[in-house]
Amino acid sequence: MDSGEVAAVAGAVGAALILLGRGRVLLLVGLGLLAVAELGLVHDLSGNRVSTKIAALGALGLIPIAIGAWVFVRWPVLVTPLVAIAAPFRPPLSFGSEHRYFVGVASSGQLGRLLPLYGVLGATALALGWHALRGRVNRPVPFIVSIPAAVFVAVAGLSLLWTEDLVSGENVLAYFLLPFAVLVVVVAHAPFPPWLPKALAVIAVGLATLFAVVGIIQAATHKLWFFSPAVEVGNAYSSFFRVTSLFRDPSLYGRHVVIGIAVLLVCVLYRKVDPYLAAGVIAVLFVGLWFSYSQSSMAALFVVTLALAAFAGGRSLRLVAALTAVVVLVSAAGILATSVRDHSARRFTSDRSRRVELTWKVFRAHPAAGVGLGSQPVASQARSTQGGSPTRFVSHTTPLTVAAELGVIGLAAYLALLGGSAVLIEQVRRRAPPLGLGLGAVFLALFVHSLAYSGFFEDPVTWLAIAIAASYVLSRNEAILEE
């Protein structure tokens, strides 16, 4: 095995230890393995080049992380809100030898990594390690989500031993799955004060409003700040102008706006906010969402709105929701049948049907263990008679991508994590209905969105929703034991 594969195995073991460990020793060993794994993966991705500039940059980065760790040791209640605030942001920074000091501003509208979140997670991990050394850690993540999460991350890490695209797999593991395993653990161990649900709702709505306002400004000026090449080309040749706000893709932007709307709808249902104020904010959010022209985001909003009406509304509201769902589904079926008859399914689905078909072929060829993490686009490309970059072959369907890359074991872990998360969130709803329904609405929005767009496990909000539910259940169980 090369250094990247060794690091992947270490990361898989480390993630399993911190998610499943029931003692401070296992937690500390797991955190140590994860740190080693991250260093190994990043080193391998950088081409095994370690220069004085890189070493100096790494040492300099430890200073704010150490300061943050001191803050979190003193005030652990800040862990969850600061993780929530940092989660969406990707500063436009790039790293490489082409920059004088190895770091510079990204060009061509690109965004960088989740650096604010990584900084917060590094500091919280150090603080958690300190608490473990002092014997203050006794809140293991509930098995109902920790077991499937550990299996999923472990299978993903081990799949780098046979992946067809090692670089992509290392990227997903180093920059998403391993840090998000840490996210679940640090948030689950964090205190859950009574004011936290309100603070999280304010953060969710505040961030969504910020993104929507930026999107509206971009729609008015026809000026994007960040964008992928595909968005730039599409806007140049389309009759409408898609905005990206502070993201590189309209659908990612739309996803975060939908989360804000979902949280506001829950607040209205439980009379936690003035309905007229909420209506005004929702109007702004919807206008911002509209200019994303994201069909997957609109579908997620539709499903979440109907689900909230059916679950928490009165009898009349449930009847309206049911009738609306029937009308929309029948209309959609008619439009689909007509469009497929008049045009090809590939054209009607904007090439999604071809991507799904190719990904299904990949899964059928490798049903047991898949083609490895991050390899689905390359594997689908190899089975196509058309050319183009691997990005044109991304399935944009999370369950199918998981099946193609990790096989039936990874798919089973994915389904188990969905089920376990639903059960855990339901436990929260029984004790705190507004919080539980809010978490459920966010998780449902992310799930529905991931059926037509990538990024379910690569979105920190997915893992944050699970972690908040775990933190609440653990804190309430401790309160019951103390009574």
Image (cartoon, rainbow, N blue to C red):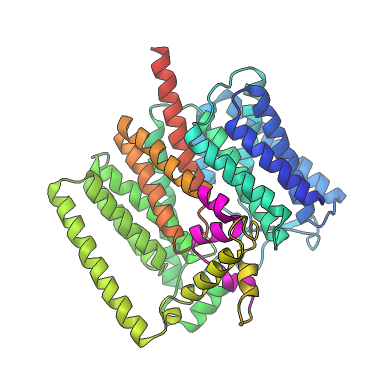
Spot occupied by residue 437 in the image (x, y as percentages of width and height): 32, 41
Residue 67 visible to an observer of this rendering: yes
Spot occupied by residue 236 in the image (x, y as percentages of width and height): 51, 81
Is 191 placed above or below 155 here?
Answer: above
Quadrant of residue 438 within the rendered picture: top left
Was residue 401 drawn as part of the magenta stretch in this picture? yes
Identify the residue at image location x=47%, y=31%. Answer: 471
Query: So how many labels did they put on this image?
Result: 0
Is 33 placed above or below 454 here?
Answer: above
Q: In this orientation, which residue lies closer to the viewer: 433 or 352?
A: 352
Q: In this orientation, which residue lies closer to the viewer: 210 or 195?
A: 195
Spot occupied by residue 72 in the image (x, y as percentages of width and height): 58, 29
Left or right, residue 214 beside residue 339: right
Secondary structure mostly seen in magenta is helix
Was residue 433 drawn as part of the magenta stretch in this picture? no
Quadrant of residue 147 within the rendered picture: top right
- Magenta stretch in the rendered image: 388-412
Quadrant of the drawing holding the C terminus:
top left
Spot occupied by residue 91 in the image (x, y as percentages of width and height): 61, 54
* Residue furthest bottom in the image: 342
Left or right, residue 327 beside residue 131: left
